Image (cartoon, helix red, strand yellow):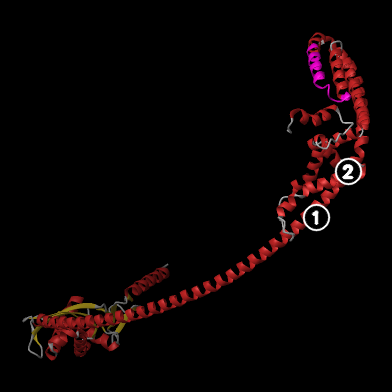
Amino acid sequence: MELAIIIGVVVILFVVFILASYIKAPTDRALIVSGLRKNPKFVIGKSALRIPFLQRVDKLELKMISVDVKTKESVPTNEYINVNIDSAVKIKVGSSKEMLEKAASNFLNKNEDYIRNSVGDVLEGNVREIIGQMRLEDIVQDRKMFAEKVQENAAPDMARMGLEIVSFNVQNVTDEGNVIENLGIDRVVSISKSAQISRAESERDIAVAKANATKQANDARIEAETAIAERNNELEIKKQELKRAADVKKAEADAAYEIQQQEQRKTIEITTADANIAKQEKEIELREKEIAVKEKTLDADIRKQAEAEKYATQQKADAQLYQRQKEAEAKQFEIQKQAEAKKAQAEADRFAKEQEAEAVKAQGIAEAESIKAKGLADAESIKARGLAEAEAMEKKAEAMAKYGKAAMTEMIIKVLPQMAEAIAKPLESIDKVTIIDGGSGENGVGTFSGNVPSVLAKTIESIKETTGFDLTEVMKANTYDAKTTKNVNFTGLPEEMSAAAKEPETDGKTE
């Protein structure tokens, strides 16, 4: 138990000893341990042990200290001009062991104010000394050199105190006679004068340069415009030459094209005329053949037509007989009245047509009888009309057979206009005719228009050759001169044609 107490006491004493012996220094402060050793121990920014009661611990401030250095009285320069200078100085304790020992011997356990006051007088003395060595203008103009000289001059004094100057800055320089201000005015005037001279020279140079530039620009512009005008003139002349050459080529091409067109048009017109003439000749030849065929079949067609019409009428009447019988009963009274009127008209027509052929007279009688029969029944009327028409055609055929050449003459005369129309019909399809003089001395138009009567005459000649019937002689025999002067009679003609031939004797004139 006693041992434990002893051990505990020992431990406590050891802890207390350690606590009492332990020291720790910050980086801006030095702890100086002195006592047992010959030389003190400097502890900076670390910890250490000291022996209580045998060693002591002192402190030394290592912080940077600001010192305002002002001359309390004006100081004359080497030009004997009194000036005052304000400056700001930064100092600190040196880091070497020697500097630490010197600082410790001077400022151990001292505060910043003590250090500031101790250093201030030293620095002021050095400033005053440097002022006396320099000219005022040098101090004002080169403050850095002044500060370097002060630092250089004060460094040994500061080193003896264990301090060093970190920086030295001149804040303000004044004088009692406003010499600095006057220097500034003179400098300002000089600078202003130099500036004005420089400005005038610059303006002069600028004006000269502008004039030269303007002159060069004008010269360049004139040269450029002259070159452009010359090029434009050359271009215009070239355009005119090209246009003139193009116009000549175009005129030549147009002339050649027009000549070629005229030649082609002439060739086409000649070819077209030849083709049209050949076409007309073919068509005339065809028409002549058609007329010849029609002439040969004319007599047979007349007889066949009469028989066909008779048969067709008979068949038509038989087909409509039954239908008309039913309709006739309702229309009997009305048809009877119409029959009386038609009968009177038929009598008048019959009287007017007494000079016609027996076929026409028989047809009129048949029609009157047919109209009369319609009063009883429309069907019987249609049948009677068909029989009458067939009988009329037979009478007409008998009359034609009786009259012979006279009847043929009448039919040919009736178809002559149709023949002439058929001959001239091909000319309607001709769009354009180019008439070229054949060299016979006749007018081309007259020659062309004379083709129709020429073809008609050839047609009459063809009728004469094929049928033996001379239409020219018949027409000559029916003229007024033949009937009166030459006493030419044509027998076998119908009564109306004979009456027409005799009519000029009664009137004593031709119509």
503 above or below 142? above
* Residue to which mark 1 is pinned: 278
Q: Residues within 10 Å of mark 1 (few under 14, many from 20)?
A: few
- SS under mark 1: helix
- Residue at the far left: name it: 177
Q: Where in the figure is residue 468, as x and y percent of width and height?
A: 92, 42
Which mark identifies residue 147?
Answer: none
Please give left or right for residue 230 compared with residue 506 in the image: left
The magenta-colored residue range is 340-359
- Which of the two residues, 96 or 41, is positioned nearer the viewer here? 96
Which quadrant of the figure has residue 500?
top right
Badge 2 vs badge 1, beta-carbon distance below 8 Å: no
Q: Residues within 10 Å of mark 2 (few under 14, many from 20)?
A: many
Q: Quadrant of the C terminus?
A: top right
- Which of the two residues, 118 or 439, is positioned nearer the viewer here? 439
Instruction: From the image, give the main secondary structure of the stretch colored magenta.
Output: helix
Please give left or right for residue 285 compared with residue 218 in the image: right
* Residue to which mark 2 is pinned: 463
Indicate which label's residue lies in the foreground, 2 or 1: 2
17 above or below 501? below
Three-letter amino acid code at disc 1?
Ala
